Image: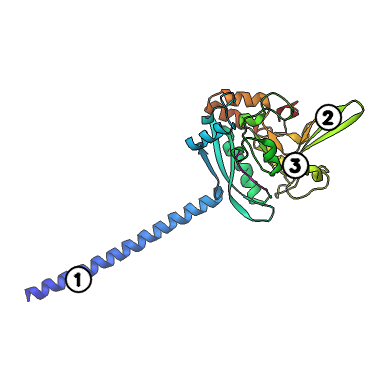
Amino acid sequence: MKNKLEASARKFYNNTTKRHWYIYLIIFLCVAGVIIIESVSNHLKNGRGFYKEIISQELKNEMIAKNVWNINCPVSIERLRVLTIPFFNFSGEEKLDGKLMVLDVAAERTLAIFKELHRNKFPIANMKLLTEYNGDDELSMEDNNTSAFNCRVITGGNQMSLHSYGVAIDINPLQNPYIDNEYEVGKLNVKILPPAGMQYINRAKLKPGMVENIINADNENIIDICKRNGFRNWGGDWEHPLDYQHFQVEREYAKKLASESPEDAAQLFESLTKNPNQKTNTLAMDK
């Protein structure tokens, strides 16, 4: 009799324990599901696949070897950030491996710009680091490559480009070409970079990929979006030459951003977004 009671008790205990474990398992799965759903939701809300990273030692070595960065650059490699940016190409295909490099304090605002372009499916041809082109800006433009940091002198000049500070962005160079009028006595030479950009010099006739296109419900174009995110100087506003692909911070601010601490520089960069339509005398010498 005693053995039967003990067996019944053990059976009851085992069954009860199993039921408890089933309940615990169900609760665990429900909680885990909620966490996963919330994580995915936040990931989508914040921009799927958009990342900011410090530069790896391998990439540092490549940048130095290909002269994308050198000791004469106005910013250290440690102040630069690599951004992974999904984008839609001109065929409507989503690419998840876009790469830009910018100054650390400009990273979040740069991501904000391209999240908005991605959300509205603004077409971008390519987005690669300048290491892919050995630091050759003209090769990058010929490939219709959207780019940012590249330690070099300005096009047609000898002072450092604003790209050398990581606070300048070129978007779709083919659809938004660089146009320089070179005057000589008795003739006019026009330089267009890339040369195939000739078909896009009429800015009144909008085509896909041009920065003047309205892309959101607020009736904003890419120029508006870049300006309100701190890149408030557009090459299309310059008197000479015209550089429709180019967005930058003014040179006076770029120097301050590079020389101040990251904390102070971050506050300064944010201050540039408060007055996006600030008019400056910065001309194409900053390309």
Q: Is residue 9 above or below residue 93?
A: below
Pinpoint residue 57: horizontal percent, then vertical percent. Answer: 48, 35
Helix, strand or loop: magenta stretch: loop
Q: Tell me which label, 1 or 2, sits earlier in the chain.
A: 1
Three-letter amino acid code of the residue under disc 3: Asn
Residues shaded magenta: 124-129
Whole-Å distance between the Cαs marked 2 and 3?
Answer: 19 Å
What crowding class fits label 1: few (fewer than 14 Cα within 10 Å), some (14-19), or many (20 or more)? few
Pinpoint residue 183: horizontal percent, then vertical percent. Answer: 86, 28
State how the image is colored.
rainbow
Q: Which residue is mark 1?
A: 12
In the rendered structure, does residue 126 fall within the stretch colored magenta?
yes
Does residue 51 appear in the picture of this structure? Answer: yes
> Which mark's residue is nearer the viewer, 1 or 2?
2
Q: Which numbered dot is residue 176?
A: 3
Q: Quadrant of the N terminus?
A: bottom left
Q: Are marks 1 and 3 in contact (CB under 8 Å)?
A: no
Q: Secondary structure at mark 2?
A: strand
Question: Which image quadrant for residue 73?
Answer: top right
Q: Is residue 169 above or below residue 12?
A: above
Q: Tell me which label, 2 or 3, sits earlier in the chain.
A: 3
Q: Tell me which label, 1 or 3, sits earlier in the chain.
A: 1
In the rendered structure, does residue 134 fall within the stretch colored magenta?
no
Q: Which residue is mark 2?
A: 182
Q: Residue furthest right?
A: 186
**Residue at the spot x=63%, y=27% of the render?**
254
Q: Secondary structure at mark 1?
A: helix
**Residue at the spot x=83%, y=43% of the render?**
202
Pinpoint residue 238: horizontal percent, then vertical percent. Answer: 78, 31
Q: Is residue 142 above or below residue 239?
A: below
